[in-house]
Image (spheres, grey):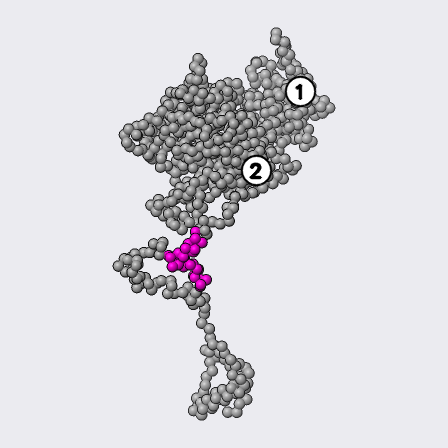
Amino acid sequence: MVHRPLARSKRRSSSPPTSLSTDNVNSEGEKEEEDGRQTTRHAVISIVPKAGVSGHVPPTIEDITRPYISVRKRNVREDGDSPHNDHIDFNKTEVKYICAVVRKYTNLLSPASESAVEELSSLMTRSHCRIPRLTKLIVESLKTGNSVDRLLLRGRGCLGIKSFLTDAAEGRLVATKMPPLDSNRVPSISIYNIGSLLSDRELARPPRGRSLMKSKIKSILEDSLVLKCTWTDSCGDISTISWRNENAFVCGATAHSDHHNMQYNKSGNLLLGSLTTNVVQEVPDHRIPRPRVESQQNRENSLHSMRETQDPWLYTSVVASSYSDFNNHNLTFTASFDKTVKIWRISEHGHSMALLGTWEHKHIVNFVVTSRLHGRVATAADVSVDAIRVYQLPLEVGDVTSSTYHTYNGSRALEQAQHEAQQLVETKWAYYPATIQWGKCKEVKDLLLVGYSPRSLTGDDSDIPEDRKNTGELCLWDIARPDRKIIIPAVRLQNVFEVQWHPTQACFIAATSPSGSCDSNTLTQIRVFVRTLGGEYDYTQTKTLDCSAPDINEITIMPNSTHHSYVTASCTDNNIYVWDTATGDDSAIHVLRHNEPLVTHQDQDLLADGAEGVRFTCWGRTADRLYTGSTDGTVKAWNVRSSEDTFIRDVLKVPGQISSGAFSPNFSKLLIGDATGKIHLLSYDDSDLAGSASVNFTPIQFLQNPSGETKHVVALEELLGKGVFKKHPDPYLGVVQGPNYYKLNLFSPSDHEELDISKPLKWDVFQNQECLHPRSAQLREINSFPRLSQVRPSGLEGHARNLKWEASLRQEARARKLELQWDFTTYDLEDSPDDLKLFSNLSL
């Protein structure tokens, strides 16, 4: 398989605040540039053509439309907090034109560089003395022609061009590039110069090619997002986040519930957050009685001791959530692997969460989606038949559990299920819903878009036949007419990864496996569908965007004009591919790159098959900011409008892989969930000093069992009361078999004579019975050491008697001419000095 080389995203770089900076044009009193100013006045007037028939009056030196101030003077003004309302940076078109003129008249060779700015800086560094001459030549070249570059440069004036060439010669255009911002440091507001925007508004000045003021202010606010609080210790990956309002939210987390890992299961799968009290508490729901595990499934979890010491409840993964305020219902829906969708009402400030109803399903539920335009709720479960349900909420919320619903089936999923039923065979895979979305504008509010993908029933993708792995179905239903299904023939046979509706128009995009004529590097595709003229709800494919990633996690669509949009695909290869539908090209305009995952697989095959990549993608208030979070543990901000400097900053860096995220309704707060079970809150920085914001780390509050007792304590008291067990008088033994222990029938026949439990124990087994070896005696033997008998002094008389006896032995030895040798190095015990003195005084 051949992969297309991916372009690395470039670091954000900029000169000091220029495009939104303010300053006054150099005063007439500056003597060092008086000559240049006079030349500028006459040069500009001479090259401006007369007004045409249209009445357009060309710019003169008094009303230069695109002024430029040198970097040195801008830096001086910035120190004084003076805005630069009359400065506009040279754009790429202008720089390329100037670079071509300089190259032509200097006859200098420039090294290959990434941009025209770097090439111009290289040329001007060797042509510093030629700046006045080059300025005049550039102005002269602008007298003829009406190309875009010439028209733009005519609004600069001679002084602006000269200042720009001076900055290039001094290397200021390249040296002022800024490194990526630290995620722990708040970006300075002066980068965007709010004062410049406010001044423009007060003076009613036009934006002069810049973004609208509202859009720029929104970007400034979003760029001040900093980490405020982190909640820890949920049961697993934060898989879903839904806001109730600006003060309350609900989160769902994955849980260990398989036979081989359920010993690690714990509560914390459903979390309720309140920002008024800064508390996140667990809601003990979406749980089932802990199932009994057989030994062939897992030996450890099948043990009786394991079952008795574990929580009687098994908490299941909560993988989807959605909030609906239609008709002032204020309902929150959560979908879980316990085969239910639960309906909640959260208090305004997030202090409590009341359960209103439960919708039972046939299998685990992966999706629940609501719409702000109507009161219907759609769910999707892992079943082949009737996988899609659409519930109709009552006008008055009462017994929500009994809400009516209609079911829907994908054609391919239903055909496969019917084939299995007819052939009486069971396959190891099936077509399940992979994505589901309601239409977002009023024209398509009743349309439900669903994508199907093949899925293994055992979790092993090898169960899916090779010729079926890239197959699936895209279904579109008109819920207002339940009997009508809109078929999209173009992708009926493709595997569908994700779908997304346009926020304001009756069109949508779908991420699918490739089809038709495409090169070998195209592994996935994004298809654009629009409504066909003359057909009420018929859709056709108008554009196909090629992608080299093997799998797509999320797609987004963001309008950038009336008829065109940005389209993004967040993929498992840690890249975000960005297209602009206005370009007419199928290739991406940007490939935004995250770093390698925090946890990598040693096996490259496992890395390719099991990589999760970019799992969070969200636009800010405008198309100026795109936020992405990946398995590298970072949330990055991008500006896809920029042709080169797309990277803005690292918004958040955490030690866990990013798993989910969501902005609050007014975009003032951002919640990020990671794979370590942490929830991170980011909000606008309101601290007085840069870097003074503090982060609060708070554990999640877990509700305690109000009874104060656990199941095994109650069971033990019951067995003691029945005489099955009894407490031994010896505290070292504790609880032993009672008189009624035999009623448990837990005897081993192989340990008894003739394999009959009524017979005595075999002798070798009987010898090892605990009752014959009291534990207390064993412990005393183990913990005790042999001691010498207590030694009492013999008294002076006895001591003198012993000394006389020893002296008599020495006298006898001398008589026998034997000499006693006292070896002081051999014996450890020697006579004390007092004894030796006493011995010497004795008469032998």
Percent position of residue 647, x then y: 53, 31
- Between the residue at mark 1 and the residue at mark 2, the CA separation in whole angstroms equals 47 Å
Displayed quadrant of residue 5? top left
Q: Residue at x 27, y 30 (%)?
A: 423
Residue farthest front in this picture:
722
Q: Callout 1: helix, strand or loop? A: loop
Crowding at dot 2, Cα within 10 Å, few <14 / some 14-19 / many 20+, comes out as some
Q: Residue at x 30, y 59 (%)?
A: 758
Q: Which residues are magenta?
A: 715-741
Mark number displayed over residue 204 = 1
The stretch drawn in magenta includes residue 730: yes
Mark number displayed over residue 351 = 2
- Residues 430 and 349: in front is 349
Is 789 situated above or below 193? below
- Residues 733 and 8: in front is 733
Tell me if label 1 and label 2 are in contact, CB under 8 Å. no
Sequence-first tag of 1 and 2: 1
Percent position of residue 361, x then y: 41, 33
The stretch drawn in magenta includes residue 268: no
- Is residue 70 found left or right of 435 in the rendered image? right
Q: Is residue 757 visible?
A: yes
Q: Quadrant of the N terminus?
A: top left
Residue farthest top in this picture:
53
Amino acid type, mark 1: Ala
Amino acid type, mark 2: His
Mark number displayed over residue 596 = none
